[in-house]
Amino acid sequence: MELLSATLDRVKPSPTIAVSNKAAELKAAGQDIIGLGAGEPDFDTPQNIKDAAIAAINAGKTKYTAVDGIAELKQAICAKFKRDNDLDYKPSQVSVGTGGKQILYNALMATLNEGDEVVIPAPYWVSYPDMVLLAGGTPVIAEASLQTGFKLTADQLEAAITDKTKWLIFNSPSNPTGAGYTWDELKALTDVLMRHPHVMVMTDDMYEHLVYDDFRFCTPAQVEPQLYDRTLTVNGVSKAYAMTGWRIGYAAGPEKLIGAMRKVQSQSTSNPCSVSQWAAVEALNGTQDFIAPNNEMFARRRDLVVKMLNEADGIRCPVPDGAFYVYPSIAGCIGKTSAAGVKITDDEVFATALLEETGVAVVFGAAFGLSPNFRVSYATSDAALTEACTRIQTFCAGLT
């Protein structure tokens, strides 16, 4: 009898986690490693949020809660959607999970049947296609390009939709590219969706508050109110509030869908951590004053990394609108040979050689569905970024 489920044959482990683990192993072995793979802020969780968690512990708020979130957090989420996105939701339309990843997974598990298709623009966050496969659906990859700023066009979306399409998964600002859709660009996509009323929209807004320069964030149900009943608007506290380890994600959408997601969660994890929920209440309701200075720091790091990578031979790095990633092309490096004699045939070989020869850990582009590229997280110190980019420059200069 086969021990493991055949379902696992359809999916692969998370490449971003694998890179981070590999970098940690090499560092523990004494090697000089700079990890640029992890997608989390290097800032500490703000003190007011930590204080709220401590107060919750001291008040004994450490028991089971409602399966998909305490009432106070759902109210805070409803207030956030109204305040930031001009979207009106009731608590019965809100689901709270153990991170945004669980929210997305619950929604797919609750809705997908065999043969259902999910349109996923590439480059994509590594988990989208595999979660669709685990839920029994079929990912349909709509490939964007450097020429379109890594953004899906209306024509591409139209071409990807079939009568089997159940969802479009949409992410802006994007992980891995940092590309953000303007109101007009998003309106062009929502116009397509209005012509296909059977398609639901799962919008991953996790990087909403991490935007730079003059970019203005917007979300699909805000741009096209007629999509309200067809949209699951997903967000969380991980990125803007430096709360990755607290594991709180949330979403709002149609009550029937939220109820189905609650059923999935009730038979898997049950409620998210009670203490983390109270911390998230403070994150959403409390001061937001730290977001702007944090963003200024991220923008400075972005500019540093973009400048230095564009000075590297064979690399072309566009300027992202948000998040804390850049997604440079290494088309000019393909076919060359490293100083250690490694033939650079694709971006995975490039990333492996870069790690082994220079100690810089990045994530290869094929993991995100678009090559030849790699992803850099610039959520680390200026000194580490400068040293890492210097090593990348040296590595590229040594390619022959």
Image (cartoon, rainbow, N blue to C red):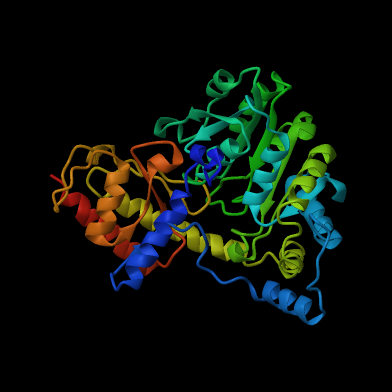
Q: How many marks?
A: 0
- Relative side of 172 to 222, left or right: left
Q: Closer to the camera, 51 or 337? A: 337
Q: Is residue 234 visible?
A: yes
Q: Is residue 113 above or below residue 131?
A: above
Q: Position of residue 240 (x, y in %)?
A: 61, 59
Q: Position of residue 13 (x, y in %)?
A: 47, 48
Q: Position of residue 223 (x, y in %)?
A: 70, 34
Residue at screen point 66% across, 17% down: 163
- Relative side of 246 to 329, left or right: right
Q: Position of residue 110 (x, y in %)?
A: 73, 38
Q: Is residue 218 visible?
A: no
Q: Is residue 120 above or below residue 81?
A: above
Q: Closer to the camera, 259 or 8? A: 8
Q: Looking at the rendering, in which quadrant would you find the C terminus?
A: top left
Q: Closer to the camera, 351 or 207? A: 351
Using the rendered view, name the quadrant where residue 270 is placed: bottom right
Q: Is residue 247 above or below residue 315?
A: below
Using the rendered view, name the quadrant where residue 209 is placed: bottom right
Task: Please identify the residue farthest to the bottom as the structure is shown.
Answer: 58
- Relative side of 314 to 4, left or right: left
